[in-house]
Structures are given as C-alpha cells and as structure tokens.
Image (cartoon, rainbow, N blue to C red):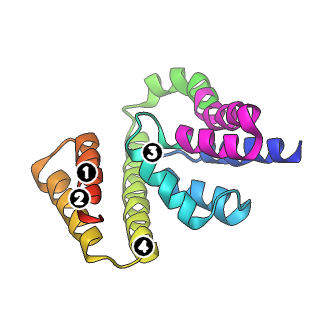
Amino acid sequence: MQSIINLFLAFLKVGAFSFGGAYSLIPIIEREVVEHYRWLTKDEFMEVLGITQAIPGAISAKFATYTGYKVAGIIGVVVANIGNILPPVLLMLSLIGILFKIGHHPLTKNFIKGVKYGTFAMVLGFGVSMLLKTSFAVKGYIIAALVFTAVAFFNFDPALTIVGAGILGIILFK
C-alpha cells in the first residue's frame, strides 16, 4: 500500500511542476523515480527515456505508466497517471476564468517570459546531464550531432528525426 501512495505522490509532484513542457519534467521524474524512490536504475531510466521518444504522448504519462506498472502493476499505472494529471487539470479548471481576464497583463506576460527562460535552462541542463551520463561512443555523438543539426537548423520533424536516429543506431551499433 505504501508503494501505491508513493507512486501517487511522486507523480503528483511531477504533475505539479510540469511548467514548460516535457523536457523540463525529465529532471524531476529522474529525481523521483531514480534517486528518491529507486524504482528505476539510471540505465533503465535512460532506456525508458529513449523508448518514450518513439511513442506518441506525454513523457510524464509514459514514465508514470512504465514506473507504475513496474512497481504495482495495473493499479500502479492508474494511480501514477492520476497523480500525474491531477495538478494541471485542477489548476486549469480553477484558473481558466482568471487567465482570460489577466492574460494580457504585463505581469502575466513577464511571468511567462521568466518561465520560458527557466525552461530553456532546464532543457539545456538536462542535455548536459545526459551527455555526462552517456558512455563515450563516437558513433553516438555522430547521431546526436546529426539530430541536433536536423532539428535546430533544418526544422526537421522531431518525431521523424527520432525514428531516423533509431535506424542509425541499428546501422551504426551492429
């Protein structure tokens, strides 16, 4: 029963701090499932992260599903996902009227700008963290450089780019 409560609380925290989109959540998810509760190893976390890129949907929901199932089966999946979606749903329901009224206010716009830059820093920090945790492989860095170039400079579709990276992985890491 304690693991069910911990699943709910861990993913409630993820859902509550899901500002800025998927990549800003990854450090929070990692801290909860790898460092705090030790449900996943660092290697397993990275593997699941790689798999999540090839599956449609929110990264937090995919981690809630994987972790929940590993820890407590189907009940764990349901509990972790409820914890994950509850904060944003409740917050949107309670703030939707207010947002329509103050969305154009300078303080609101400045708050959103601050969140945007904070999110950028978290994504950059996550990228550096992943780089430092990844074992050195020239082939891997070639794939990373190609994906970065395709997305950053040529506006390739991220989903197709991830599939392409997977295919390159099959070819290069025989």
The local crowd at label 1, few if under 14, some if 14 to 19, many if 20 or more residues have their Cα within 10 Å, is few
Q: Give the CA distance from mark 1 to mark 3.
A: 16 Å
Query: Residue 142 colored magenta?
Result: no
**Amino acid at pointer 2:** Ile
**Amino acid at pointer 1:** Ile
Tell me where residue 52 appears, x and y as whole percent: 45, 45
**Amino acid at pointer 3:** Thr
The label number, if any, that marks residue 52 in the structure image: 3
- The residue carrying mark 4 is 134
Is 46 or 82 nearer to us in this picture? 46
Mark closest to the chain's N terminus, 2 or 3:
3
Mark closest to the chain's N terminus, 1 or 3:
3
Is 145 or 32 nearer to us in this picture? 145
Mark closest to the chain's N terminus, 3 or 4:
3
The stretch of residues the image draws in magenta is 61-89
Q: Secondary structure at mark 3?
A: helix
- In the displayed structure image, the side of residue 102 where residue 4 appears, left or right: right
Q: Is mark 1 in CB contact (under 8 Å) with mark 4?
A: no
The local crowd at label 4, few if under 14, some if 14 to 19, many if 20 or more residues have their Cα within 10 Å, is few
Q: How many marks?
A: 4
The label number, if any, that marks residue 171 in the structure image: 2
- The residue carrying mark 1 is 167
Q: Secondary structure at mark 2?
A: helix
Q: Give the CA distance from mark 3 to mark 4.
A: 17 Å
Residue at image position (66%, 56%) is 33
Q: Is residue 21 above or below residue 143?
A: above
Q: Give the CA distance from mark 2 to mark 3.
A: 21 Å
Mark closest to the chain's N terminus, 4 or 2:
4
Q: Is mark 2 in CB contact (under 8 Å) with mark 1?
A: yes
Mark closest to the chain's N terminus, 1 or 4:
4
